[in-house]
Image (tube, rainbow, N blue to C red):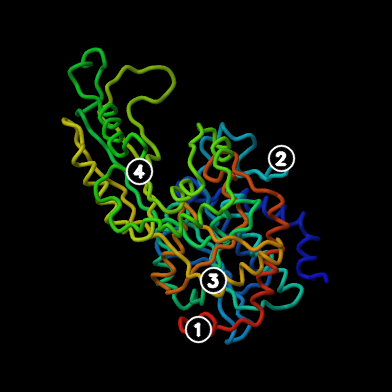
């Protein structure tokens, strides 16, 4: 039996790709003020498209940062649940631009994939959701549930004002659960549902060793070098095996149980193939150890380190300043503030003699998130995936962070189900970000199936007592 909504989406696949090309052509980089026009262009495009699809009250809302775009359709009646369908229109910077094989803001098809900045994270996946909901309105004149769309403009810079948005616009954004088109599925070859994420936090540090840059001939051997000091300091953060060597960093963290490790060992995963795919030497980890490290252990990483002269040619200076950016991924039980302070105290304790340390740009961060196993939206999403793939999806965790999940639980008291059709190997945040063209058909089928699964579900199912 055919589904008229799905048939419409399939018939308009070319139009979908054309719309996606228009959206990715808006260079909506949130972290760099130079892209303010691209951010505004993306918002205008979204408001126009959402209105054309039949959503009401398409508008911008802001709480001190980049505006979000919202719209709604609440015609399913008061007994039907309200879902906050989430995505983000902001993207990472395209740098280094020279490493792209095609222009970063021009959608380019190549070998079964679509290439552009933001195509996978998160413009393609959230446009799948939006266009599916619009197809329901066009074909059937209604949705099975009430929907409020929230398309954020700050996810790629830490969702700094998302909490304020949910507080300031509490009535507008009130919902029974969040259905996120962001979050990325783990693998394209294995149906999975992500039921947990790591939290995160971070900081920037600076070391000063002298009052100014110095000539390396006239002062070499007698003046300290800030980059040397930074290298020594950074090296103290981990032991020889790469484990975090910061006292109290693990405070509160919940270690993986034997039952969890046994579950991890049963997940089909080729560790050697993974290592080869990212160009590293064989790690020789077992599946359980690999997935535990990826999902259930905290990390501390240096995201950038710089100082002195980095231009073409040589410049023989002893740099006065050195800088580094640090980020942490956190597991259940860890407090972002306490983890951050543990790292700060370690840096102060191990700061090399003669260097002055300053810590700036600290991020409040978010806690790790776990979705209740019996959540009705999770169960509906799993049923939809099983219907469209003929496989029961596995429940997995994600090493990355979706700030929304922790923020929505703390402020609105609602949980988040991730239903994304991006995949972890699509180079988001890197040059040549791409999105599988096969995800379009898979995503349309799954989103339609999910809406069918939600038909007849009432708000009572989402109450804590149910």
Cα separation, mark 3 vs mark 2, equals 34 Å
Quick check: 252 left or right of 135? left
Give the mark nearer the N terminus: 1 vs 3. 3
Q: Earlier in the sequence, mark 2 or mark 4?
A: 2
Residue at numbered disc 2: 110
Q: Position of residue 451 (x, y in %)?
A: 66, 72
Could you tell me if the residues under marks 3 and 4 are in contact, i.e. CB atoms within 8 Å? no
Relative to 106, say whether 136 is above or below.
below
User: Horizontal placement of 449 versus 352: left or right?
Assistant: right
Looking at the image, tell me whether mark 1 or mark 4 is earlier in sequence order. 4
Picture coordinates of residue 11 (x, y %)? 81, 60
- Residue on which the image places disc 3: 84
Q: Quadrant of residue 204?
A: top left
Element type at mark 4:
strand
* Mark closest to the chain's N terminus, 3 or 4: 3
Instruction: Kindly tell me whether residue 194 is visible in this rendering.
Output: yes
> Compared to 277, does 268 lie above or below?
below
């Amino acid at each position: 039996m055919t589904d008229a909504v799905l048939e419409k989406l399939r018939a308009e696949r070319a139009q979908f790709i054309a719309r996606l090309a228009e959206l990715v052509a808006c260079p909506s980089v949130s972290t760099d003020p130079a892209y303010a026009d691209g951010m505004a262009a993306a918002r205008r495009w979204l408001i126009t498209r959402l209105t054309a699809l039949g959503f009401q009250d398409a508008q911008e809302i802001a709480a001190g940062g980049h505006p979000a775009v919202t719209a709604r359709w609440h015609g399913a009646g008061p007994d039907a649940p309200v879902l906050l369908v989430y995505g983000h229109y902001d993207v990472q910077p395209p740098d280094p631009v020279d490493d792209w094989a095609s222009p970063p803001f021009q959608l380019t098809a190549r070998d079964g994939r679509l290439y552009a900045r933001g195509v996978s994270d998160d413009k393609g996946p959230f446009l799948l959701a939006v266009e599916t909901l619009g197809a329901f309105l066009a074909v059937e004149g209604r949705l099975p549930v009430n929907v409020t769309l929230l398309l954020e403009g700050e996810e790629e810079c830490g969702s700094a004002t998302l909490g304020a948005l949910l507080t300031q616009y509490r009535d507008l954004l009130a919902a029974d659960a969040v259905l996120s088109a962001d979050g990325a599925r783990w693998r394209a070859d294995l149906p999975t549902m992500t039921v947990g994420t790591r939290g995160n936090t971070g900081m920037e540090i600076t070391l000063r060793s002298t009052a100014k840059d110095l000539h390396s001939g006239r002062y070499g051997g007698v003046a300290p070098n800030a980059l040397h000091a930074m290298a020594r300091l950074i090296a103290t953060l981990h032991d020889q095996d790469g484990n975090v060597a910061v006292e109290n960093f693990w405070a509160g963290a919940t270690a993986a149980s034997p039952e969890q490790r046994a579950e991890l060992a049963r997940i089909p995963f080729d560790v050697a193939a993974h290592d080869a795919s990212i160009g590293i030497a064989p790690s020789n980890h077992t599946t359980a150890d690999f997935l535990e490290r990826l999902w259930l252990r905290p990390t501390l990483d240096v995201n950038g380190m710089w100082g002195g002269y980095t231009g073409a040619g040589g410049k023989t200076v002893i740099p006065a300043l050195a800088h580094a950016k640090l980020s942490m991924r956190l597991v259940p039980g860890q407090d972002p503030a306490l983890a951050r302070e543990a790292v700060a105290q370690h840096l102060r304790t191990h700061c090399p003699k003669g260097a002055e340390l300053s810590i700036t740009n600290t991020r409040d961060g978010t806690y790790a998130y776990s979705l209740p196993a019996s959540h009705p939206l999770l169960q509906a999403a799993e049923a939809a995936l099983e219907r469209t793939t003929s496989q029961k999806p596995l429940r997995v965790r994600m090493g990355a962070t979706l700030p929304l999940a922790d923020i929505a639980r703390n402020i609105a008291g609602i949980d988040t189900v991730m239903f994304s059709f991006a995949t972890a190997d699509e180079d988001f945040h890197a040059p040549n970000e791409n999105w599988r063209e096969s995800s379009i058909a898979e995503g349309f089928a799954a989103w339609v199936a999910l809406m069918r699964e939600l038909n007849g579900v009432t708000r009572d199912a989402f109450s804590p007592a149910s």
